[in-house]
Amino acid sequence: MDLMNYLEIVASLLLIVFGVLIVMSKSIVKTIIYLSALSMIAALAYVLLKAPDVALTEVVIGSGLITFLFLFTYKRQKKVGDQE
Amino acid sequence: MKNILALLLIAVLAFLTMTYVVDNNLIPEYGEARLDQTVSGAYVTQSVTEKNNDVSFGRSDNLETGSANAVTSIVLEYRAFDTLGEVTVLFIAALGVSLLLGSSENFAKRPKSGFILKVGSKIILPIVIIVGVYIITHGHLSPGGGFQGGAMIAAALLLMAISDPQFIPSIKQFKLLEGLSGTIFIILGLVGISVSGYFLSNYMDTGIIGTLTSAGIIPILYMFIGLKVGSELISIITDFLREEAECD
């Protein structure tokens, strides 16, 4: 067991943890932030599996632009309907 | 109770999948895959039509693709037509977003950015843009390429939009750039038909593998893909920054 194996185990465990957190968290903003963190760890996993091309895409699209799109869409939402 | 049931179900499913994969040897041990018996081996040794020869970095010349990055040689040489489809998908996505959100001329008011974001973005911005340009121009040598580099440049503009509430990308030029680079991509492919008989063929000299001017038309194609993807993503981001249009 060298450093790479430990990194792989830590990355896969963190992936599971963040995946559960995304499903379980009550607040939408928190979910989006967890999703961004999951993308970052997935990129680390891709690098460890020797797929740097996919890792680059994951970092830029999954962690950067997707977070922006989700956050802005969430902020744009308005409450519609009768006020009670 | 429901959660525990779901967790159990997932555990059973994962166990069954993993035992099936391991028992049938669907995935070879890490690093043990025999590439010389598969099609991907021919892709890695850069020669599908001829006999496989050893390729040495910085010395071999006149290879089939001449791209040191095997992923790029597949994406823009053997499967270049698929890449054209991918770019088209992104174009349609950007078109849909601008049809839905782009009707308003005004931009929504953004909150004032903090001091750390303002100063930090000024330091990070040039680095992000330079890395993006590097990834695009070295797409045939190192990991990455037009998609990743273009997305990185778009992310740099997003950072600018977040840090400066007054900043608005001038979208007209980006739309022009996007259409122009898409057209040039298709024209370069059509030239391939007249030169060597099939769409997007690599008709230029492939040069010595590992140098910046190697791989024929791949760097040129990647440059235009980078411009196209970058401007498409920037137009999506700009549409999201717009104010909501009034509708009755």
Image: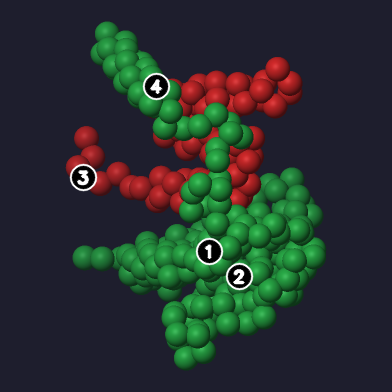
Chain colours: A red, B green
Looking at the rendered image, the disc whose residue lies closer to the viewer, 4 or 3, is 4
Q: Are marks 4 and 1 in contact (CB under 8 Å)?
A: no
Q: Residue at x 32, y 15 (%)?
A: B12
Nearer the observer: mark 4 or 1; the answer is 1
Residue lying furthest front in this view? B51
Q: Secondary structure at mark 3?
A: loop
Question: Residue A26: in sight, yes or no?
Answer: no
Tag 4 and tag 3 share a subunit: no
Q: Residue at x 33, y 47 (%)?
A: A78
Mark 1 or mark 2: name the one nearer the start of the chain: 1
- Disc 3 and disc 1 in contact, CB within 8 angstroms: no
Query: Alpha carbon of mark 4 to alpha carbon of mark 3: how far?
Result: 56 Å
Q: Which residue is mark 2?
A: B64
Give the residue pinned by disc 3: A81
Distance (Cα) linking label 3 and label 1: 62 Å
Position of residue B62 in the picture relative to residue B191 (left or right) = right
Tell me the quarter of the picture where residue B177 sits. bottom right
Residue at figure coordinates x 58%, y 63% from the top left: B51
Q: Are marks 4 and 1 on the same chain?
A: yes
Horizontal side, residue B184 vs residue B128: left or right: left
Q: In this rendering, do the residues under marks 4 and 2 share a single chain?
A: yes
What's the mark number on residue B48? 1
Closer to the N terminus: mark 4 or mark 2? 4
Is the residue under label 2 in contact with that under label 3 (CB below 8 Å)?
A: no
Mark 3 surroundings within 10 Å by alpha-carbon count, few (fewer than 14), some (14 through 19), many (20 or more): few
